[in-house]
Image: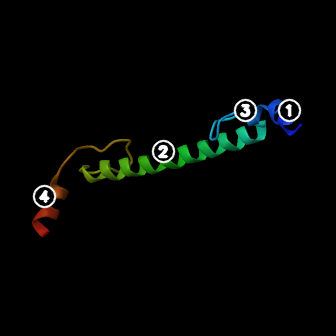
Amino acid sequence: MPEAAAASDPASALPPGAFQRNTPWSERVWSGLLWGVMTLFLVNIALMIAAVATNSFARRWLGTWLPQGWTTNWYVDAWKEF
């Protein structure tokens, strides 16, 4: 009789490691929130790195969306100091 019970359970018919699509909605919500928070975190880190990289080539960057000019003088001076 245990074989009949196992055959009627759809989860037991799946191979090990297979993804079940009938997950409860709360798990999907938490999974979506987790992916959303991780995405926001990575976008935040990427934007900070982009701001630092842009600032490193800026001539002067105060009060505007983009720098007024571009230069590599900071890198040349750092190389001469090294």
Task: Identify the residue at horizontal 72%, vertical 39% (top origin).
Answer: 29
Q: Quadrant of residue 32?
A: top right
Pointer 2 or 4: first along the chain: 2
Nearest the eye: 26 or 69: 26
Q: Secondary structure at mark 2?
A: helix
| Residue 43: image tag | 2
CB within 8 Å, label 1 to label 3: no
Q: For the residues carrying marks 1 and 2, which lies nearer the camera in this image?
A: 1
Packing grade of label 1 (10 A; few <14, some 14-19, many >=20) is: few
At label 4, the amino acid type is Val
| Residue 13: image tag | 3
Residue corresponding to mark 4: 76
Task: Identify the residue at horizontal 72%, vertical 32% (top origin).
Answer: 13
Is residue 64 rendered to the left or right of residue 11?
left
Residue 6 rendering spot, x and y as whole percentages: 81, 36
> How far apart are the two marked residues, 2 and 4, measured between alpha carbons?
30 Å
Residue corresponding to mark 1: 4
Taking 28 as reference, is 50 above or below it?
A: below
Q: Quadrant of residue 68?
A: top left
Taking 34 as reference, is 73 above or below it?
A: below
Residue 22 rendering spot, x and y as whole percentages: 75, 32
Pointer 2 or 3: first along the chain: 3
Is residue 53 rendered to the left or right of residue 10?
left
Nearest the eye: 76 or 6: 6
Task: Identify the residue at horizontal 13%, vertical 63% (top origin).
Answer: 79
CB within 8 Å, label 2 to label 4: no
